[in-house]
Image (cartoon, rainbow, N blue to C red):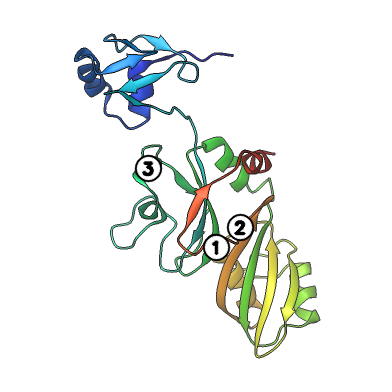
């Protein structure tokens, strides 16, 4: 089904200026639709089926963008921060005009999978406590982790504020003075993974999210790198 929208609304939403500025640009004949100059900013078109150009440059209309980032240590999962660099600072301007935001947060010192998008419905579905979306982390822990700890997490542990977590799955990779594990949780309380290990008397030394829902972190992405999600990955997220 076609979706007709005002030209000034389309261009304004994509970051090409306010509607007032778009009106001025169009009156100067700088905007063409399917090769024809259009000066009426209130004209309605379907942006998916009409060729829009400004100063001869083709405008690729998209309502939503979906990015996968391997978040680095020292960067905050926010759209704005007066002190720290944010994940938005790491992306190109061509994506910033869509005003994406991180779907869920990773602590400043936590690395790994972060989805950025401007799709509010997707964000709600992934973050809703009722959905119990699984999130898996690679964790390095000070001290030995054993089968008893697996059972504790499976039963749910009581955090320092009295909250009892949902059952979590832990797989031990390496059991030594510094243990390495994968931990899968179904909720997203503040600093939850770190607090869960504190509850069993252990300290997290390194934390990296490797999957969220049905999406796994692309292992080819270095920390700080990102890419657009493929169509099949977007579908997995939306499922």
Within 10 Å of the Cα at label 3, are there few (<14), some (14-19), or many (20+) other Cα atoms? some
**Residue 69 versus residue 105: which sits nearer the camera?**
69
Percent x, y of residue 189: 58, 60
Figure check: 139 above or below 28: below
Identify the secondary structure beneath mark 2. Answer: loop
Identify the secondary structure beneath mark 1. Answer: strand
Percent x, y of residue 232: 66, 40
Q: Earlier in the sequence, mark 1 or mark 2?
A: 1
**Disc 1 from disc 2: Cα separation:** 7 Å
Q: Earlier in the sequence, mark 3 or mark 2?
A: 3
**Disc 3 from disc 2: Cα separation:** 22 Å
Q: In the rendered image, which quarter contains the N terminus?
A: top right
Identity of the residue drawn at 51% across and 67% down: 110
Q: Which residue is mark 1?
A: 112
Q: Which residue is mark 3?
A: 96
Identify the secondary structure beneath mark 3. Answer: helix
Identity of the residue drawn at 26% across and 23% down: 55
């Amino acid at each position: 089904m076609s979706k007709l929208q005002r030209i000034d609304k389309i261009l304004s939403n994509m970051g090409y200026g306010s509607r007032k500025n778009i009106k001025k640009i169009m009156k100067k004949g700088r905007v063409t639709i399917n090769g024809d100059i259009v000066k009426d900013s209130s004209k309605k078109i379907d942006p998916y089926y009409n060729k829009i150009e400004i100063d001869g440059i083709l405008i690729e209309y998209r309502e939503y963008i979906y990015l996968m980032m391997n978040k680095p240590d020292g960067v905050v999962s926010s759209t704005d921060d007066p002190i720290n660099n944010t994940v938005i600072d790491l992306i190109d301007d061509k994506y910033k005009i869509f005003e994406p935001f991180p779907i869920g947060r990773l602590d400043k010192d936590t690395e790994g999978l972060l989805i950025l998008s401007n799709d509010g419905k997707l964000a709600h579905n992934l973050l809703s406590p009722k959905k119990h979306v699984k999130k898996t982390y690679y964790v390095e822990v000070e001290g030995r982790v054993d089968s008893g700890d697996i059972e504790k997490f499976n039963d749910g542990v009581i955090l320092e504020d009295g909250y009892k977590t949902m059952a979590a799955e832990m797989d031990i990779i390496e059991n030594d003075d510094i243990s390495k594990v994968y931990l899968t949780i179904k909720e997203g309380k503040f600093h939850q993974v770190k607090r869960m290990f504190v509850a069993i008397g252990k300290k997290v030394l390194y934390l990296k999210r490797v999957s969220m829902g049905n999406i796994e972190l692309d292992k080819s992405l270095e920390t700080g790198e990102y890419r657009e999600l493929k169509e099949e990955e977007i579908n997995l997220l939306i499922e």
